[in-house]
Image: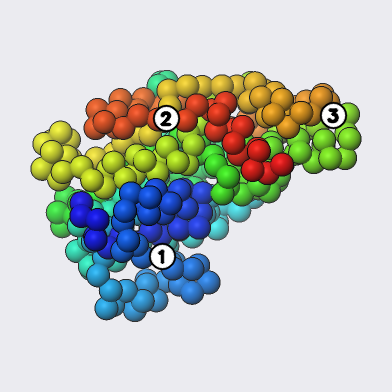
Amino acid sequence: MKRNSSIFIAGHKGLVGNSVLKKLKKNGFKNLIVVEKKKLDLRNYEKVENFFRNKKIDYMIMAAARAGGIIANNSNQKDFFLENIEIQNSLLKLALEKKIKRTIFLGTSCIYPKFSKVPINEESLLTGTLEKTNQCYAIAKIAGIKLCEALFEDHNLDIICLMPTNVYGDKDNFNKINGHVIPAVISKIQEAKKRNKKFVNLLGTGKPLREFIHADDLAESIIKCLEINSTTLRKKFKKKLPILNVGTNEEITIRDLSKMIAKFIKYRGVIKFDKKSPDGTFRKGLNSSKIRGLGWYPKIKLVDGLREVIEKRM
């Protein structure tokens, strides 16, 4: 991939898109296309088509999505389903129309069945029942993968689908109600410390295991997938759509994660768990051997990444 290639980063201000933008700039890429959400509604294909009518796009990174934690998913099922479907459809139509050289589709580990054997292989897709608390988001992403597959097989469109585990970073949504687990826990414990509360209540039992990846590590995997040779890729995946898990192979319970966060914030109160609230899938660690076979490995340990995120918010 040439340094003057034009690269469209959809969702450049989000958790992942922001990290990708920074990494590409650092690596010397100058022809980067970004557009503010308020200036272009990615859900509307006509507007997307008009915006890019006279623009060249060599590569596209689909980092735009509606995402959130258990409460956000469970209470806004329609929006999570429709918005993600609409964004994906618009961008993949654009990829076909503009004959984009390579598109990176970002999925989620939520696509896999609730009771998948851990570590979860990519082949586990559509082999069982999904976790109910985020099934609309998961189904939307599965639909996106299937559209990628159709475009790959029927139109020879070069697409790579990445399925990251739980992503975190300093550009996350730190809403204590709607945010993902790490930013929500950070916000709750920071608030408890600020108000000198003797205890803090967190959702669930604290027992589920989660695998976390820093947004900067995920960005590196995206760039690695942009740069890999098409012939090598098709040979390695036997002319099938590449679907790649992206994780760290390290799991931690929500309880231990919360203790780690409390330690960095210097909160000495009691951490309580609301056992009446849902846990989600108990365990969903990924088998990331396929992407490691392409030469990508995570660099940021959870303890270091968490410390950095929290320090930026202190």
Residue 93 is left or right of residue 184, and the answer is: left
- Looking at the picture, how far across and down is residue 91, in whole percent? 34, 62
**Secondary-structure class at tag 1:** loop
Mark 1 vs 2, N-terminal side: 1
Marks 2 and 3: CB-CB under 8 Å?
A: no
Q: Residues within 10 Å of mark 1 (few under 14, many from 20)?
A: some
Residue at point 24% right, 60% down? Answer: 5
The residue at which mark 1 appears reads as 34
Q: Name which quarter of the figure residue 208 lies in.
A: top right
Name the residue nearer the viewer: 159 or 4: 4
141 shown above or below 120: below
Name the residue nearer the viewer: 7 or 143: 7
Residue at point 34% right, 39% down? Answer: 221
16 shown above or below 100: above
Name the residue nearer the viewer: 122 or 75: 122
**Secondary-structure class at tag 2:** loop
The residue at which mark 3 appears reads as 199
